[in-house]
């Protein structure tokens, strides 16, 4: 089932890039990010409330809070820089370069989480890196 969720994530990430490029055209990219984040905030808390998961919040350990907060900070910074890149660059070049995050994630998962890396994963990461480098060239 995770593969379907991952494909849906990729599809909606693609829509995000297109919608964001159009939406950030005439306003400050930081303001655009704040508006987007507010929509996400309302949507996700609505899902939590509708799914009756609010009571689970008191069961979250401090360690988990720490890493969720760090993840939120990293996400916010990622979005701020992504919107700035979209504002001045072509979405068809910005989005693939942004996907270098996949390669960085693989490296960090190997180094920090001790996740195994197969030849297939290394080959895929090299292909993504090569594609991103091609997008950087004018």
Image (tube, helix red, strand yellow):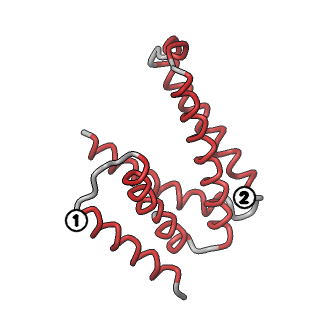
Taking 90 as reference, is 18 above or below it? Answer: above
Instruction: Name which residue lies at 56% across and 26% down.
Output: 45
State the CA–CA distance, disc 1 to disc 2: 39 Å
At label 1, counting other C-alpha atoms closer than 10 Å, the crowd grade (few under 14, some 14-19, many 20 or more) is few
Contact check, label 1 and label 2, Cβ < 8 Å: no
In the foreground, 100 or 122: 122
Which numbered mark, 1 or 2, is in the foreground of this view? 1
Report which residue position mark 2 lands on: 29
Relative horizontal placement of residue 10, taking residue 35 as reference (left or right): left
In the foreground, 127 or 122: 122
- Outermost residue toward the bottom in this view: 138
Report which residue position mark 1 lands on: 119
In the foreground, 97 or 113: 113
- Which quarter of the figure is the C terminus placed in? bottom right
Taking 27 as reference, is 39 above or below it? Answer: above
Q: Position of residue 77 (x, y in %)?
A: 65, 52
Q: Position of residue 136 (x, y in %)?
A: 53, 80
Q: Position of residue 3 (x, y in %)?
A: 27, 46
């Amino acid at each position: 089932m995770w593969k379907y969720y991952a494909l849906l994530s990729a599809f909606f990430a693609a829509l995000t890039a297109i919608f964001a490029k159009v939406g950030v055209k005439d306003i400050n990219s930081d303001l655009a990010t704040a508006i987007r984040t507010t929509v996400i905030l309302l949507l996700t808390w609505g899902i939590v409330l509708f799914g009756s998961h609010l009571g689970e919040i008191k069961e979250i350990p401090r360690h988990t809070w720490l890493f969720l907060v760090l993840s939120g900070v990293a996400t916010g910074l990622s979005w701020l820089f992504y919107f700035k890149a979209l504002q001045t660059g072509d979405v068809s070049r910005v989005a693939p370069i942004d996907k270098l995050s996949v390669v960085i994630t693989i490296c960090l998962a190997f180094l920090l989480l001790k996740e195994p890396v197969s030849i297939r994963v290394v080959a895929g990461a090299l292909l993504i890196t090569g594609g991103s480098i091609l997008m950087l060239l004018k």
